[in-house]
Image: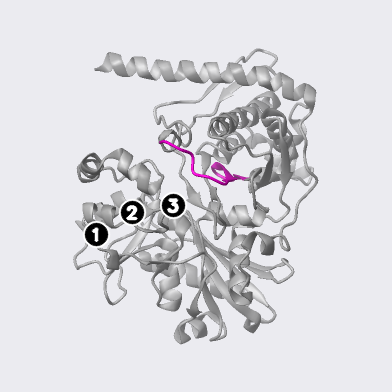
Amino acid sequence: MISLGVDIGGTGAKCVAFSEEGKQEAISYREYPNPAGKTDLDPLVLAEAAFRVIADCVAALPQPFSVGAVTVKKKGASFVPIDDKGQPLTDIIMYFADTGSGEFDALVKRVGEETFMDITLTKPDAFYSLSKMLHTRQLASRPVWKHLLISGYICYCLSGETTIDTSLACRTLLFDVKKRDWSDELLLASGFKREQMPAVLPAGTALGPLKPEVARRLGLPDTCQVVIGAHDQVVNALACGVKGEGDAADVTGTTESIAPFFGAIPPGFDFQLSNYACVPYLNTPGYVTYAYNISGGAVVRWFRDSLAAHLSQEAGEAGLNLYDLLNRQCPKEPGQLMMLPFLQGMGGTPDIEPRARGLIYGLSMDTSQGDIYRAILEGLSYEMAINLDALSDFGIRPRRLYACGGGARSPVWLQIKADVWNREVIPVLTEETGALGSAILGFAALGGQKDLPALASAFVRHGEPIRPDPRRAAHYQGQLKRYKRMRELLMEEISQKERVSR
């Protein structure tokens, strides 16, 4: 039996096929053909890209009719408003777009920020779906029948069903997390109707078979089930082996996110005010949150492209990619350079300050390119250490961090993380963890398994744990104090400039 995991990304779609033994059987990827400079996305273009990657992946399988399930996952809060004939009414406002408006601000003021945080366990922000829904309501030429998040829209195109799972419902700012249902109070206050929202179902629920015409187009059997997925950090955590207290997934791609498991909702509102959300973890009684930094692998890639591109020939002659060469040239021991990695502003948790900028302190005539590379890896690790300290204040203390994504392929960076965080970092050997997590949900739907973390344990592949070196860990504790002080000075300078400008 084969299960397909479909990943709807911000710039392209991917489909990966996995066997029941967890072996990757095929993979396909397509970028969206968006014109340069256009950030919004035509839903029909998105659906076509999703259909094509599925068909390409299926065509690469020796036995395509062994595919039993297709599961779709997506991050972010982007959605598609459709009419009663299933036609999209506007372009998709991508999750990273700013849709802050007077209407959204007035709604939050009228309802009350604390009311939002009490119901949604999330600090209200224009990042989430609600702001985008208010915005597109003014643009739609016909009444909206359903508001579908992107993964739900693709599931609708595949099966005709309109659904959402709890982890993505949390991204709308209209979901009562404690009741696991839409909030009638917030729907009424914002002017949306319950019947306009998709049905909330547990991740891993089979929605039914593919539409016959869709099955024929994709080269799949009519019996292939469409399965509801989850937020990408949730399926990543599942494929990493997160199953209880002390576990967390550390996903390092363009951004970095740590998703720890915890058993109880932190009291009060300080958790939400620190920009942490409280998200039900699949069908377990526990939760995860997303501690993240938008300046993750993107800053490493900036260094590669802007300051180390001249090493490409040397890397090629050695049979290495450029990242491998940089890891070889990286000093073995910590240095004195300090990097504030805010090349895109300070974005994520626990602080958001878009005006912040990056800084390298401590340069001298002896500084090498490798020293700067290591300082970048350390700076990114310090920023996530601040998140781990903040989470600890709320009683969330992961002891094991399962590392996946592009950053997990760097043993140098993994050791730096273990030393800076002073805890065990365990590499996940599966590269496509998001797609694998989705495929696991597909297998669960086909087999009727309810204990999803237990099922996932049969698929998870871990490398050797990387443990902190006591000497380096002690050094980094001192360096982390320096980093925090420099970070505070940066924030103070921004605040002072703001006061002067007033």
The answer to which quarter of the image holds residue 492 is top left
- The percent position of residue 367, horizontal first and vertical second, equals 68, 18
The kind of residue tagged 1 is: Phe
Q: Nearer the viewer, residue 196 or 51?
A: 196
Which circle's residue, 2 or 3, is located before the other in the chain?
A: 3
Report the Cα–Cα distance between label 2 and label 1: 10 Å
| Magenta span includes 264 | yes
Point out residue 493 in the picture as x, y percentages from the top left corner.
41, 15
Discs 1/3, front? 1
Q: Which residues are the magenta region?
A: 249-268
Dot 1 lies on which element? loop
Q: Which sits earlier in the primary sequence, circle 2 or circle 1?
A: 2
Q: Give yes or no for residue 165 being in the magenta stretch.
A: no
Mark 2 and mark 1 in contact? Answer it, CB < 8 Å. Answer: yes
Q: Which mark is residue 174?
A: 2
Q: Is residue 491 visible?
A: yes
Q: Tell me where residue 479 appears, x and y as whole percent.
A: 65, 19
The residue at 45%/76% (across/down) is 158
